[in-house]
Amino acid sequence: MRTSTRTAGTVGAVTLAAALLATACTQTGTGGAPGTRTATQGTVKLPPVTLVAYDGCDDMLAGLRASTAGNVGPWGLGGPSILYATARDSAASAKSGGEAPEHSTTNVHEAGVDEPDLVKTDGKRVITVNRGVLRVVDTATRKVTGTLRLVNPEMWAPADLLVSGDRALVLFSGGGIVPFGATSKRAAIGGPHYALVDLSGKPKVIGSLTPEGSHVDARMVGSTVRIVVRNQPRIEFPDHGDVSEAERTRRNAEIVAKAPIEAWLPRYELAPTGGTASKRTVGCERISHPAKYTGTSMLSVHTLDLAGTLTDTAPISVVADGDTVYGTGSSLYVTSNPGWWSPRPIDSVIVDDAPATPAATPTASSPPPASPAPPAVSTATPGTTAPDAPAAPGAVPGLDPQPSLLPEPAPDASTASPEPAPSAPVTSPVPAEPPAVTPGTATPVVSSPATGTPSAEPVEPPEETEIHRFDVTAPGAPRYVASGRVPGRLLNQYSLSEHEGHLRVATTLTLPARPVSPSAGPSAGSSASPSADLSADPSTAPAPDPAVDPAVEPRGVPNTSSSVHVLKADTLVKTGEVGGLGRGERIYSVRFIGPLGYVVTFRQVDPLYTLDLRDPAAPRATGELKITGYSAYLHPAGEGRLIGVGQEASEQGRTLGTQVSLFDVGDPAAPRRLSQMFQKDSGSEAEWDPHAFLYWPKTGTAVIPLSSWTGSEPTTGAAVVLDIGDTEITKVGTIQHSARKRANNTRLAAYDPGIRRSVVIGDELWTVSDLGLKINTLDGLAERAWIPFS
């Protein structure tokens, strides 16, 4: 069966999920109470999402050439940047006799699903990978019992680990890797490299996988690892000299039209145990495609069992894009945002020349004086979401078929109001039909529907997230289940959560910029969420009310709003939604805990929203707490308690330093902050990488890495140890490792990120840095040992 592939104006983010379904056919055996916000929006019904195999390589080449040529620009193929987030991990006990001491493991999103990180422990061993060297430390003798150099010492090679029993998979994400012992004639590996290591004796590599492309992410359930890799066509575009961009585009399209099939086929090298390395290519029969695609990206899923031998990874590929991976014990989700527009970056930190900092560093139990008056719970009038309006033929209900989205305006510090914008739900009028979009260029341009001539004004593609679910309960390749789509963008994998047959998805949606009315102020709220209005019929929509309509924005406030969508996990069809969270702000952190959800948005202040998700058809926001600063990571701390790690900020939104907050969320209608630890002029890796956060419930101990700075010179990174009580945070102490020595008695020193991770083993706290391991007592932090990495 041949399928039409010559499409224009397609969205680059397409489905990975159905690839595995196709592979199964082609692959061989190798209404709320006062004070609440509710939404009962209609279901988003997607067009059928089905991937099919090509009718051979000729069919594949014709389709890829046509689609890629339609997305080429004056400078070649523009592509998206790939964004890279207390349970037991799957590391088994060492073979030595006796039981392993009680210990912590990697801080992962879901129990039973391990995530790659730079340190793993099973209680008897601590296994680290650092600057290309894997080390095994015996926790009883506190000695390094095994060392394995995996790359040449002069190479900078960031890596992570997955461990199952006596097998470790070392995942190098890329960056000029030269495997240790390789001849000088061998070129550096620019993409990812995965080494399978035997830990039963002296550590040794027993196999490796080296795919071309870029590493997206990996997850492990039991001993089965699934690795997602993305690659672009290998097509070289020369410098065409002093010609117009239109002429450059035309010439580049001609180059694409002559490219061979090998330019698109994903390639990888496999080096099994005791065998010869072999270069392989994913065959045409193992590549699938949707009805519409750009041809500028492919995703491949490699599956390997750490308990077996690395003889084949049975890769399967799809002409698609992807950036976020989320897994449970039974499901694997892959999501993608618009594929030809660079992801929206995190807002730049505002540096205040004269910040309103506290006069003195506050104690752990009291907020800094810069904080506002006692936090208040929002009592804004609740809103309800109107049913979906009839969609145009071929349109997706709940989504405008081609909304014209402009880049988010930067906040204007000189004109921004110090008062936070109201965050109640608002009604969004549907924009006029936008001009056709020409994708695939480095800077997207707008084409006139009538003439096709490009104009200079950039237009973003529809801001939406595609979600694809696989069943991973059986060994081997996952089984495709369903695909769905929601408006807006994810923050990270914590924006997704599967619970009792439903998937909860938190997104921030940026609506088109509107003319500014100088007389209008912030809206007070209304009856519908922004995403519900994207499908409204402009001819029947009521006239916008300037008092509640985001078309009339306060000067300098972005036209953004966040929502939590609830989808059926088996079909990914939407059953409910709560919207209107944080108008003019974006999501900074999300945490779902059972039937409850917590969302933090931020621009000048930090609204912490509490969500009741027990009824999938009618999720609702039950409470709101507004405080200065924000939490970038949320962690459960027992019944009715939540820990937040982030930044304190002035009332104008200028960050001041790391804060750790303890929230009482026992009453969903009245969340409150009980205590706060604040460290001026500091930051923590735990703010952007949850693996750096440790919480040990048995003793209420929390540990975060912390880097402080004075002026332009940072201090050595340390680990701050906190006691998380029922009502108070107490600073127990600080652990520091020896600083890296300066070179030749100068002020220059090698980069030292300081302490990166911490683990609990028995009654001891182990901290890990690039220089070694330090062991302290958990009670009192008395130093017991230092294990240097020589």
Image (tube, rainbow, N blue to C red):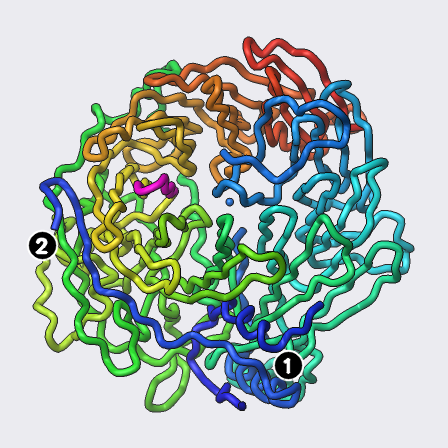
Q: Quadrant of residue 361?
A: top left
Work out whether mark 1 precedes mark 2 in sequence or the reverse, and give the earlier one.
Answer: 1
> Residue beneath label 1, please?
240
Quadrant holding the N terminus: bottom right
Q: Is residue 512 left or right of residue 292?
A: left
Q: Secondary structure at mark 1?
A: loop
**Of residues 116 and 252, the one drawn nearer to the viewer in this rendering:** 116
Residue at 60 percent of width and 83 percent of height: 252
Q: Quadrant of residue 614?
A: top left
Amino acid type shown at disc 1: His
* 685 over 617 or under it: above or below: above
Q: Is residue 439 left or right of residue 785?
A: left
* Circle number at residue 337: none
Q: Position of residue 391 (x, y in %)?
A: 22, 76
Q: Position of residue 666 (x, y in %)?
A: 26, 28
Amino acid type shown at disc 2: Ala
**Of residues 195 and 562, the one drawn nearer to the viewer in this rendering:** 195
**Of residues 336 and 415, the one drawn nearer to the viewer in this rendering:** 336
Q: Secondary structure at mark 2?
A: loop
- Asked if labels 2 and 1 touch by Cβ distance under 8 angstroms, the answer is no
Q: Is residue 493 visible?
A: yes
> Residue beneath label 2, please?
547
Magenta part of the protein: which range?
589-596
Residue at 80 percent of width and 53 percent of height: 207
Residue at 68 percent of width and 66 percent of height: 314
Q: Is residue 590 magenta?
A: yes
Residue at 84 percent of width and 36 percent of height: 201
Quadrant holding the C terminus: top right
Q: Is residue 173 magenta?
A: no
Q: Is residue 490 left or right of residue 285?
A: left
